[in-house]
Image: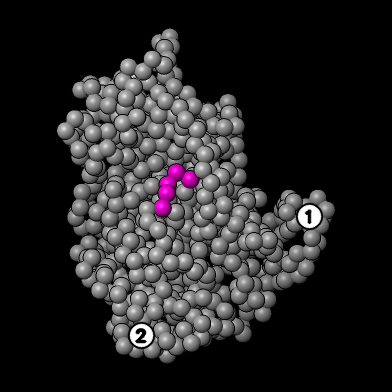
Amino acid sequence: MKHLFSFAACACLLLFAPTLFAQDAVVLSPDKQLQLAVSVADGKPVYSVTYMGKKMLDASPLGLTTNEGDFSTGMKYLGKTENVVNKTYSEEKIKKSQVQYTANKLTCLFENAQQKKISIVFQVSNNDIAFRYELPSWGERMACVVEREATGYRFPSVTTTFLSNMMSPMTGFARTAPSYESGYVADAPMTRTNRNGEGFVFPGLFRVGNDGWVLLSETGVSSLYLASHLSEYKDGLYTVEYPNPKTNNGFGSSTAALALPGVTPWRTITVGATLKPIVETTIPFDVVEPLYEASQKYKYGKSTWSWILWQDNSMNYDDQVKFIDLAAALKYEYILMDALWDKNIGKERMKELINYARSKKVEVFLWYNSNGPINDAPQGPRNKMYTAIERKKEMKWLREVGVKGLKVDFFGGDKQETMRLYEDILSDANDYGLMIIFHGSTLPRGWERMYPNFVGAEAVVASEMLVFVQGVRETEAYNATMHPFIRNTVGSMEFGGVLLNKYLVKSNQGRNQRLTTDAFQLATAVLFQNPVQMFGLTPNNLTDVPAFAIDFMRTVPTTWDATLYIDGYPGKHAVIARRNKAQWYVAGVNAGKEPLKLKLNLPMLAGKKVRLYGDDASKAAIMKEVIVDKNGAVEIEMQASGGFVIK
C-alpha cells in the first residue's frame, strides 16, 4: 500500500477560492451523471453527492477515530490520485450471473494534527458509490483500534425514509436479538425515531423528494472488522454507528481491531432517478473478492422443510420421511431437517434418514444452534458451532454421513467477534464440503462473493413470523413489496416462503389463516432471491392446490442470469423480471386493499405466447396463456393481497 501514501506534498493539489464547501477533489461516474465531491471544511473532511445535477447528499462528514489518533477533525487535505477500475466476474448466487463493473477511482490523502496520514478511496460507477478508509502503518505502529466513525449522510430536507429498526440487544426469543427482524416503515419522515434509540439497520432506502432515490448499505465485512448500522437522525444527519456493547451478553468489543496497513469495509451508496438502479445494483459484490476457493462445485436448488408449518412436533423420523418423499415428488434437490433433530431422531437414525433421502435423490441440510455463551436459545444441537474443536469434529461427521449443508441459527449482534464466528463457520464448512445458510442473523455484506459456500441468510421478518404473529400475516403483502427494493437487493434472502396451505398450521384449518392469494405466493418464489430456497409446501399441497401451481413450484429456478426492475413502489406493489438461461419470469405482488391494473412494458417477451398465473375476481388461482403484443405491452390485474407470474 506504499503507493497510497507517497505523495504527501503532491504537486497536483487543487486550490480553490475559500467557500463553505471548496471542492478539493471531484470524481464522476463513467456516464458523468453521478458526481462526488470531497473537501475539508474547518478541518473536517466532507463529501457531497449529486445525480443528474440534483443534490442527493449535502455536505456530509467523513473520518474515523482510532486509539492512535483522531482522523475526523484537525485534518488537512494533501492530494489525490485517480484511476479507472474495470473488472468482469461471474457469480451465480446473486441477481445477475455475469457482471461488468467499471468505475472511476479517486484516492484522497489526508493527515491529522499529529501528521499521521490516512486515505479515503472512492469508486464511482454508474449509479453506485463505494468508499472506504485505508490506514497505513504509522512508523513502528502496526495495529490500532478503530473506536468510531464520523461517516455520515446528510439528505436534503424533502427526503423520506424506508428504514428498519435495529433491535435492542439481549431481547426477543431467548435473548437472541438483534437479528435484523424488524419491518420496514415506508415513506416516513427523517425525524422518525426508533423507540429504543438503537438506530436503523442496513440497508436503508431514501426518497429525495421527486429528484431520485438513494440506497445506503455496506459490504466487505469479514472477520477483520465489525458490521455497522445507521444512527438515529440527529442534527440533520445519519451517521455510521458501531454495535451496542451490550450485544452477545456483553461479550466482545464494540470497536474494531485492525492490523496495519488495513482497510475498513466499504460504505455503499446507490443512486437513481427511479427505482431501477436500486433493484438492479450489484455494488455489494462489485468491490469484493472471494476470500478462499470453493472446495467443490456447490449445487443450488429447492428444499422442503417440515418445521415451518408442522413445527417442533414434526422433528421425528416418520414425518421427515414424508417430507423426503415430498421433495422427491417435487424433484427438489434438498430437505432441511430443523431444530431438535439431535434429541428426537439422534445421529444413528439420522444416518438412516440421510441414506433414505439419497435413495430418493434428495440431499440433506441440517439445523444447528450457533450459540455457546451468548444467548439462551435451548434448541439443539447446541455448542457444536461455537468453537473450532467441536465444529471440526461435527463437520467431519457431517461429511461422513453425506450432509450437504447447514442452517445455523441464533447469532445476534454485529461485533467483530461475531463476524469472526460467521467467517470461521463458513471457512471450516468449506473444508468439509458444506454449504451454509444463516438464520437469526445479520445482513450478509458481500458474502455471496466473498465466501463460496455461503448460500443465504434470513435477516428479515421471514415466514416463521407469518406462523407466529397475526400482525405479520396482516402485513405480508406490504412487507413483500419492500424486499425487492431494500433487503433483497443487497443480498440473498432466505425467507422460507411459498406457503400454499390456507391456514398456516399442519391441519390446514381453524387458525392462522393466510391472507394472501396462491398467485401471490407463487410470485414470491421469483421476487425473493436466494440460491437455495426452503419452500413451505406440505404433502397435502400435492392434491389440495391446483395442479398448475404445483407444476410451477416444481420448475421455478433459484438462480438467475438477469434481474430487471419493471414497476412498483415500496409498500404498494412490486413487479420485477428475472431470467434463468432463456426463460423469463415476471412476478408481481399488490399490497393494496383494492385490485390494481397495470400496463407493463416487457420487450423481452414481445410477440410471444406466455403463461400467466394469477387470481380471478374471487381470488382463486388461475392459469392461462396470453400473447404479449408486438411492442411488449401487456395488461395485468392483481387482486388485493394478490399477485401474478408471467412465464
Nearer-the-camera pick, 276 or 405: 405
Q: Residue 21 appears at what percent x and percent y?
A: 42, 18
Asked whether residue 287 is drawn in magenta, I would say yes
In the rendered image, the quadrant that contains the C terminus is: bottom right
Nearer-the-camera pick, 298 or 213: 298
Q: Which residue sits at x=36%, y=18%?
A: 10
User: Residue 506 vs residue 422: left or right?
Assistant: right
Q: Amino acid at mark 2?
A: Met
Q: Which mark is residue 350?
A: 2
Q: Which residue sits at x=46%, y=84%?
A: 357
Mark 2 crowdedness (10 Å alpha carbons): few <14, some 14-19, many ≥20: some
- Which residue is disc 1 drawn over? 606
Q: Secondary structure at mark 2?
A: helix
Q: Is residue 135 above or below residue 520?
A: above
User: Residue 321 vs residue 414: left or right?
Assistant: right
Q: Does the magenta stretch mainly form a helix, a strand or a loop?
A: loop
- Looking at the rendered structure, the number of numbered marks drawn on it comes to 2
